[in-house]
Amino acid sequence: MPAYKKRGSQTVVFEDTPVITSWASIVGPKEGQGPWGGDFDQVLADYMFGEKTWEKAEKKMLQEAINLALNKRDLQVDDAELILAGDLLNQTVSANYAARELARPFLGLYGACSTMAETLLVGAMLVDGKFFNRLISATCSHHYAASRQYRFPTEQGTQPTPSTQWTATAAGAVVLEWAGVGPRVTSATIGQVVDLGQTDVADMGSAMAPAAAHTLKTHFEDLQRLPDYYDLIVTGDLARVGMAIAEQLFIRDGLVPRPNYSDCGVLLYDEKQDVDAGGCGCGCAAAMLCGPLLKKMLAGEINKLLLVATGALMSPTMSFQGESIPGIAHAVAIEN
């Protein structure tokens, strides 16, 4: 009988650790102007990417990021046995239409801004379980497409609040394989929905922070590890408001992961950029992972990384009905 791979209440440990053999990132103009602009594979000159709508530009970004990640390994689209992808838009249309063009077996996943971690952990399970040898985990978001759906159309010129986050225009994709050279996905903690009653749709960071703390605490308890096991723990994407709350929750729970803790929504942009509280969106954690973070792992500057991607599982319809905002966070350990 094979060994049971679940540890504790919510964590799985991979026996034949899946390998991230390639990765790629594409970002928008504002993201390219940030501190990591030189670490992304492609920076768009504008937000349309040669398309007629923002939604079609987002689809194209995801499709091109997947192609680029495969091309780096001298692989064709047909070499990918499965694509796991999702996005923020209704019915995950960006991923759906990208999958239509790529014409490969496809599973659409939705975890709001936690989707990159969700596609990674599901992909790692499928590879470790020997269901697939090679697959793609990917996600994307587009600032203007998301604003039109979740906030206010840009044309209205609505004034944001200080707690509002800037949805990243970005896409990231990784090639996950059973064997190869690259950082390995060693374990993952599947998040639990946490809702402390936050209802302000202009403050997603506060809604997601409790889920990040819950998942992080569970991860360490399940694996009986101390926070200093990792060179870097990075949440995504709480931004400045949510990160401050998360840090207080970490202290309450005895985690205190600093100084090796940060947040993708804080890292992605420069403090001088006009992004309100910081970054958000599926592409935020995806771009940071598939840009500077995996690049640092390749260089040996980071050897043990814990990505704790967070998501606000809400919709405008439910908010209009007076519902609060449920949060979730999935943790994925990546090690050299």
Image (tube, rainbow, N blue to C red):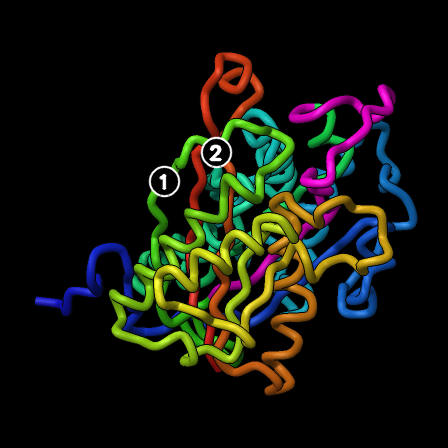
Q: Most extreme residue toward the left, as rendered?
A: 1
Percent position (x, y) of residue 122? Answer: 39, 52
Label number found at residue 324: none
- Give the residues drawn in magenta, as a range: 149-176
264 to 184, vertically: above or below: above
78 to 312, vertically: above or below: below
Of marks 2 and 1, which one's residue comes earlier in the chain?
Answer: 1
Q: In this view, does 225 lie to the left or right of 166?
A: left
Which of the 4 image quadrants contains residue 328? top left
* Residue in the foreground of this view, choosing between 91 and 152: 152
Label 2: which secondary element? loop
* Residue in the foreground of this view, choosing between 56 and 314: 314
Task: Please name the residue that numbered disc 1 is placed on.
Answer: 193
| Mark 2 to mark 1 CA distance (whole Å) | 9 Å
Label 1: which secondary element? loop
Task: Kindly identify the residue that appears in the image at 59 percent across and 65 percent down.
Answer: 262
Name the kind of residue labelled 1 in the image.
Val
2 and 1 marks in contact (CB < 8 Å): yes
Q: Can residue 198 be seen?
A: yes
Percent position (x, y) of residue 177? Answer: 46, 67
Task: Please name the residue that numbered disc 2 is placed on.
Answer: 313
Residue 108 falls within the magenta-colored stretch:
no
Q: Can residue 66 be seen?
A: no
The residue carrying pointer 2 sits among few (fewer than 14), some (14 to 19) or many (20 or more) residues within 10 Å by Cα, namely many
Percent position (x, y) of residue 319? Answer: 53, 19
Task: Kindly identify the residue that appears in the image at 28 percent across and 60 percent down.
Answer: 11
Task: Kindly identify the residue that appears in the image at 84 percent across and 56 percent down.
Answer: 43
Q: In this view, does 252 lie to the left or right of 311?
A: left
Q: Is residue 316 left or right of residue 127?
A: right
Which of the 4 image quadrants contains residue 286? bottom right
